[in-house]
Amino acid sequence: MRSASAASGNDMDATWLDVLDTEARGYLPLVDFGAWRVAVLGFDDDLRPDRIDTMERHTETDEVFVLVAGQAVLILGGSQLQPGAVRPVVMQERRVYNVRRGTWHGVLLSTDASVLLVENRDTTSRNTELASLTPICRQGILDIARRELVR
C-alpha cells in the first residue's frame, strides 16, 4: 500500500490528510478510526471461483461493499443456520451494497477488480462465522462466475 501525503507539491499540512492507494491483492485494511474500518479487496488466487469453498457472515455488524474497478458479483446465501442456494448480485461501480448482519456472503472478482469495504473495526473471527459450502453451492458459484465475469 502506498501512502502519499497531501502536502506533496503544495503548502498543506501533512498531518491533515492521508492519501492511500486502493490497489491490493486480497484483503487490505486502509484506515481504522474509532469503531470503523475502511479496507480494500482485490483479486487474489485464493479468491478464484474454483477455490471458494466457504461463505461468511458477521454476527454483530453489517458490511458495505463498493465496486471501484473491474467486475464483482456478491454471492448471498440467506440468513439461516447454514448458507442456502447462492444468489448473485452483479455489482455496479460506485453503488453501495450493504450486506446485513447475519447474511451469508462472499464476493467473486475479476482479475482487475477492486472493492472498497467498510466494516466495524472489531470485525474478526470472534464475530464472524464461516460455513463450508455444499457441492451444489460450489457448482452454483462456478456457474455464476462463468456467466457474470469476463475473463
Image: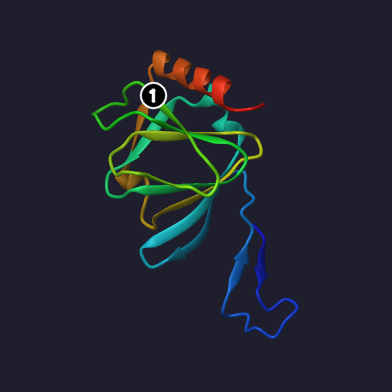
Q: Toward which corner of the image does residue 5 lie, by quadrant?
A: bottom right
What is the residue that sits farthest to the left in this orientation? 81
**Image label count:** 1
Rendered location of residue 37, percent (x, y):
44, 58
Element assignment for label 1: loop
Q: Toward which corner of the image does residue 122 lie, by quadrant?
A: bottom left
Residue 146 in the image: above or below residue 46: above
Q: Toward which corner of the image does residue 36 lie, by quadrant?
A: bottom left
Q: Residue at x 29, y 44 (%)?
A: 101
Q: Residue at x 34, y 38 (%)?
A: 57
Q: Residue at x 56, y 20 (%)?
A: 147
Crowdedness near tag 1: few (<14), some (14–19) or many (≥20) residues, C-alpha within 10 Å: many
Does residue 27 show up?
Answer: no
Rendered location of residue 139, percent (x, y):
47, 15
Which one is in front, 86 or 126? 86
Does residue 130 show up?
Answer: yes
Which one is in front, 95 or 117? 95
- Judge from the rendering whether residue 45 lies leftward or rightward of residue 92; answer left or right: right
Q: Which residue is mark 1?
A: 86
Q: Quadrant of the N terminus?
A: bottom right
Rendered location of residue 19, percent (x, y):
62, 67
Q: What's the residue type where badge 1 is placed?
A: Val
Q: Quadrant of the C terminus?
A: top right
Rendered location of residue 98, percent (x, y):
38, 46
User: How is the protein colored in the picture?
Assistant: rainbow
- Judge from the rendering whether residue 120 lies leftward or rightward of residue 31; answer left or right: left
Q: Residue at x 63, y 80 (%)?
A: 14
